[in-house]
Image (spheres, rainbow, N blue to C red):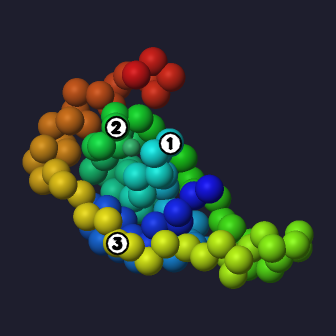
Amino acid sequence: MLELRPNCELCDKDLPPQSKDACICTYECTFCKHCVETVLKNVCPNCGGGFTERPIRPKTARRKNVSLTNQPASSKRVVSQFSREEIAEFSRDVKDIDPGDR
Ligand SMILES: [Zn+2]
Ligand SMILES: [Zn+2]
């Protein structure tokens, strides 16, 4: 199950669970769309994989015990361990390789 992390790991923008601006990699490293497109260039700085839009967990339990209320989003903010320079350098080396071939 996704943690639904509360912020962009790079610019610290709030990404609440209903945000359509949140992108995740397969490890759920979480960034805003703007950072993914302009800084990361679809390269996760932690794992080198690509991103996809984070799905939105329903507010309403339309099935028993399955909703944002039953499984709430994480409130633990995550901050990247890498500098913008390190991230830019990493992305430069990986961005032109198709995510399926990385
Ligand atoms: Zn961001
Ligand atoms: Zn990642």
Q: As rendered, which of 15 and 77 lies closer to the eye?
A: 77
Mark 1 CB near ligand 2 (8 Å cut): yes
Front-lying residue, 84 or 75: 75
Q: Is residue 6 visible?
A: yes
Question: Which residue is disc 3 drawn over?
Answer: 77
Decide: is 14 above or below 47: below
The type of residue carrying mark 2 is Cys
The C terminus lies in which quarter of the figure?
A: top left
Mark 3, residues whose alpha carbon is within 10 Å: few (<14), some, or many (≥20)?
A: few
Q: Disc 2 vs disc 1: Cβ atoms closer than 8 Å?
A: yes
* Residue at disc 1, secondary structure: loop
Q: Residue 21's x, y, as percent?
A: 51, 65
> Which of the numbered marks, if any, corresponds to residue 26?
1
Q: Distance between the residues labelled 2 and 3?
A: 19 Å
| Residue 78 coordinates in the image, percent (x, y) | 32, 65
Query: In the rendered image, which quarter is residue 77 located in?
Result: bottom left
Secondary structure of the residue carrying tag 2 is: loop
| Residue 30 drawn above or below residue 56 | above
- Residue that numbered label 2 is attached to: 47
Q: Which amino acid does label 3 sit on?
A: Arg
Would you call the spot at circle 2 few (<14 residues within 10 Å), some (14-19), or many (20 or more)? few
Q: Residue at x 28, y 43 (%)?
A: 45
In the rendering, at what x and y percent does residue 22 appear? 50, 62
Q: Distance between the residues labelled 2 and 1?
A: 9 Å
Circles 2 and 3, Cβ within 8 Å, touching? The answer is no
In-image side of 14 versus 64 (left or right): left
The amino acid at mark 1 is Thr
